[in-house]
Amino acid sequence: MEQKRILVLCGGQFAFPALQILELEKFLCGVGIGKGENEALKVIERETQNSGLPYQSFPTKESLTDLKGWIEELQPDYIFSISFPFLLSEDILSYGEERFINFHPGPLPEYRGPMPLFEVLRYQEKETAISVHFMNKEFDEGAIILKEKLPVSPNETYGELAIKLSERTAMVALNVAHMLQFGSQIPRTEQDENQARYFEKPEVTDTFIQWKRMPADEIISLINACNPWNQGADTLLQGRNVKILSASLSEEQHADTPGKVLQLTPEGEMAVSCLDGQIINVQIIAGDFGIQTVERFAAKKPIAGLLFNS
């Protein structure tokens, strides 16, 4: 049986493990790269050149005018999209029905959008998924081929979850490649639009801590969801822009105003009051002073009584 040829469209280092395993198993026939982190793009470009794989960059949406011709030149059996940043037009998708397959790092249809990891963490989900689906002219709406569920660990950060999903996506991509190679029929289940939610890319209003409205566990979840991509959750400390990168829930209680720094704990953490008498202990903050432990920050000035503003 002739080996299936798979072109991968990707946008950064999230796709690295999948690219490596698909190349190792002789499925990979080319790599197309959308906009992404410069260093990650350089690594992908160098690796494809070293392996002799066809490679093309699509840095802007306008540059996709060259994609259809390149696909027709390579003649892949299937096109995998793994963190590719652009929506593909009907003209490009006309290359072949059910040949375009997306690997979405979140549960579908509940978490459509460009950053499902952030939303899954912010909403304190206990599990997430890699949703593999056929692509159509809309983001994340095609029929589901399979879902690979993964647990979300307590206090897991965006970065930690992204690494876990990236590694698992590689195995899922290989399993799908084998399914396409040896299966007689690809499973498909239409998405339930009654359960569908689409989340735009987060803005400052989404990453800003609302001390007077958010309980402690919600604040910690937001902090974890913003680490490291946003360099922490946004807030104001005495009117000064800062970000919180790491915090944990305290067993202590208080009867003070939400957002007040109560003390520096013996462990060198900043105890901050939250709703319903809860307290979080902040370990790392960032601002125009750089990224610092609270202990180092507190060594320069007293912190008890300082206020975080909503």
Image: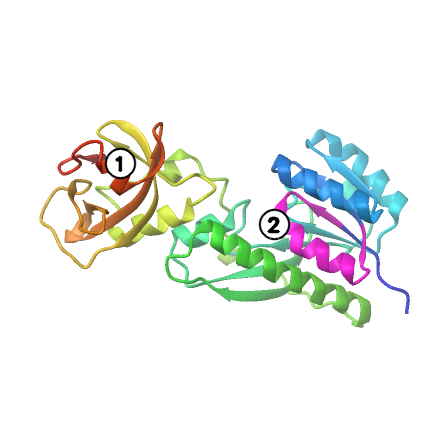
Is 139 left or right of 247, judged from the image as shown?
right
Disc 2 designates what residue?
A: 14
> Which residue is depicted at the point 24% across and 44% down?
213
Q: Vertically, is 158 above or below 24?
A: above
Kindly indicate the quadrant of the structure image that contains residue 126.
Answer: bottom left
Mark 2 or mark 1, earlier in chain? 2
Is 234 left or right of 133, judged from the image as shown?
left
> Relative to the observer, which residue lies in front, 99 or 241?
241
Residue 192 in sight from this viewpoint: no
Residue 136: percent from left, percent from top: 69, 49
> Which residue is depicted at the point 17% across and 43% down?
258
As for residue 77 lying within the magenta part, the answer is no
Kindly indicate the quadrant of the structure image that contains residue 137.
Answer: top right
The residue segment tinted magenta is 8-29
Find numbered disc 1 in the image and state the secondary structure of the residue it sits on. Answer: helix
Find numbered disc 2 in the image and state the secondary structure of the residue it sits on. Answer: helix
Residue 119 in sight from this viewpoint: yes
- Colour mode of the rendering: rainbow
Residue 84: percent from left, percent from top: 66, 44
Q: Quadrant of the C terminus?
A: top left
Is 123 left or right of 144, judged from the image as shown?
left
Q: Neighbour class for label 1 at 10 Å: few (<14), some, many (≥20)?
A: some
Single out the residue that lies furthest toward the left: 255
> Which residue is depicted at the point 75% across and 63% down?
177
Residue 172: percent from left, percent from top: 65, 64
Disc 1 designates what residue?
A: 297
Q: Vertically, is 64 above or below 198?
A: above
